[in-house]
Image: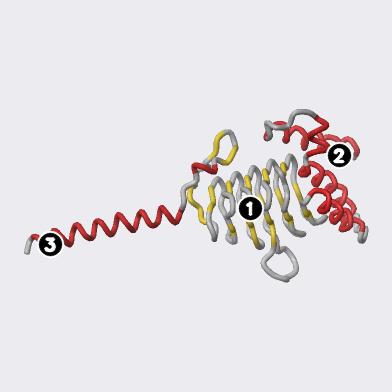
Amino acid sequence: MLKRALNKIKEDIKVIYDNDPAANNLAEVIFCYPGFQALLFHRIAHKLAYWKIPFLPRYISYLTRIVTGIEIHPKARIGNRCFIDHGEGVVIGETAIIGDDVLIYQQVTLGGTGSEHGKRHPTIGNGVILGAGAKVLGNITIGDNVRIGAGSVVIDNVPDNCTVVGIPGRVVQQKVLSHDGVLMHNRIPDPVTCELNRLKYELQEIKEKFNERMADG
C-alpha cells in the first residue's frame, strides 16, 4: 500500500511538471503548489473516510482548506494524475467523482443543486479541463476529453469530446478546441454572438427578398 501511495505522489508531481512551465524544482512543487498539497491530504482523508473513521477526515479537509484555499470533501473520489492549477476557491463536493488526467483551474465548483441526499454532485470523465471559475452543478455526467470554458455554468450532461461555454453551458464545438491537450480560451466561439450573427444574416436575406418583391411591383 505504501508503494502504491508513493507512486501516486510521483504521478502528482510529474503531472505538475508536464502542465506548468513555471515548475522549476521539486521543493517548489512540494511546498508552493496548493493543488498538490490539497490532493495529498485528500488522499489521506479519503482513506480514513473509507475506513469509516469519524470526524478526523472532515477535520483534515477543513485544515487543508485553511492552508490551501481548496475544499475537497473526504468522500469525493479523485482519479490519477489530477492537477489543480493555482487552486484558490476550488470546491469539490461529497459525491463528486473525477476521472484520470483532469485539469482544474482556480474557482471551479463541482457542487450540488439542493439539499437532496444520495448522488448529488457531478461525475467528471477522463482528460477533462475545467476552466477558471467554471461551475458544474448537480448529478450530471461530463464525458471524456470535454473542455469547459472559464466562467461557464454547466447543469446538463455533456457528451465526450465537446467544448462547453456560457451560462447556462452550451456545447459550441464537438471537436475539442485545444492544442496539445490545453484548452485554447482565445479560440472558443461565443454562442450568443454566433446566434446574433445568424439572426442578422437571416434578417438581411428577408430584407433583400422584400425589396425584390417591391421592385417587381
- Residue under numbered circle 2: 5
Image point (65%, 48%), residue name: 125
Viewer-proximal residue among 196 and 92: 196
Name the element at disc 1: loop
Residue 191 position within the rendered picture, expressed as x and y whole percent measured from the top left: 45, 54
Residue occupied by mark 3: 213
Give the image quarter of residue 20. Answer: top right
Mark 1 vs mark 2: in front: 1
Q: Are marks 1 and 2 in contact (CB under 8 Å)?
A: no
Apparent side of residue 143 relative to residue 67 in the rendered image (left or right): left
* Viewer-nearest residue: 147 or 105: 105
- Return the residue found at the far left: 217
Colour approach in the figure: secondary structure
Dot placed on the residue nearer the N-terminal end, 3 or 1: 1
Q: Position of residue 94 (x, y in %)?
A: 77, 59
How many neighbours does mark 2 have within 10 angstroms: few (below 14), some (14-19), or many (20 or more)? Answer: few
Q: CA distance from mark 3 to mark 2?
A: 76 Å
Are circles 3 and 1 on residues that touch, CB within 8 Å? no
Q: Residue furthest top?
A: 25
Report the residue marked by disc 1: 133
Number of other residues with Cα within 10 Å of mark 3, as a class: few under 14, some 14 to 19, many 20 or more: few
Instruction: Give whichever of discs 1 and 2 has the lower sequence position.
Output: 2
Residue 60, image x, y percentages: 88, 53
Q: Nearer the viewer, residue 46 or 66?
A: 66
